[in-house]
Image: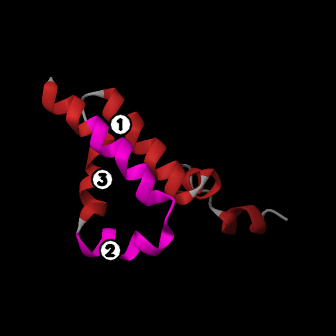
Amino acid sequence: MESEIELHDAIVELNGIATVPDLYPLVVELGAVPSILELLAHENSDISVAVVNLLQVSLGQHVLSMLLFPIDLTSEFSRK
């Protein structure tokens, strides 16, 4: 349990990086993105929620919503 608390704290600390977009390439270079995304499926929901919050801060609510709930614009335009 202690390691999950440390993991949660580490994810929360990443919110500081999320506010500095110039550091995003470094996060990608270090290979952190796949690890962060894997944590979305963590059995501890607190970890998953912390990752969603991190993505929300990093990407903004609008972009995150589009990624989680994509819409097919081609079908929207073809109806008209």
Image coords of residue 12 (percent x, y): 38, 42
Image coords of residue 70 (percent x, y): 57, 56
SS for tag 2?
Answer: helix
- The image's colour scheme reads secondary structure
- Viewer-nearest of labels 3 and 2? 2
Residue in view at x 32 percent, y 68 percent? 27
The three-letter amino acid code for the residue at tag 3 is Ile
Circle number at residue 26: 2
Disc 1/disc 2 C-alpha distance (Å): 23 Å
Quarter assignment of residue 31: bottom left
Label located before the other in sequence (1 or 2): 2
SS for tag 3?
Answer: helix
Q: Is residue 10 magenta?
A: yes
Against 32, is 23 above or below?
Answer: below
Left/right placement of residue 32 relative to residue 1 reads: right
Kindly report the secondary structure that dominates the magenta region of the rendered protein. Answer: helix
SS for tag 1?
Answer: helix
Dot 2 alpha-carbon crowd within 10 angstroms: few under 14, some 14 to 19, many 20 or more: few
Which residue ends up furthest to the right in the rendered image?
80
The segment highlighted magenta reads 8-30
The quadrant of the image that shows the N terminus is top left
Circle number at residue 36: 3
Image coords of residue 24 (percent x, y): 41, 70
Label located before the other in sequence (1 or 3): 3
Residue in view at x 30 percent, y 53 percent? 36
Left/right placement of residue 75 relative to residue 19 reads: right
The three-letter amino acid code for the residue at tag 2 is Leu
Residue in view at x 24 percent, y 55 percent? 35
The three-letter amino acid code for the residue at tag 1 is Ser
Are the residues at dot 3 and dot 2 in contact (C-beta closer than 8 Å)? no
Dot 1 alpha-carbon crowd within 10 angstroms: few under 14, some 14 to 19, many 20 or more: many
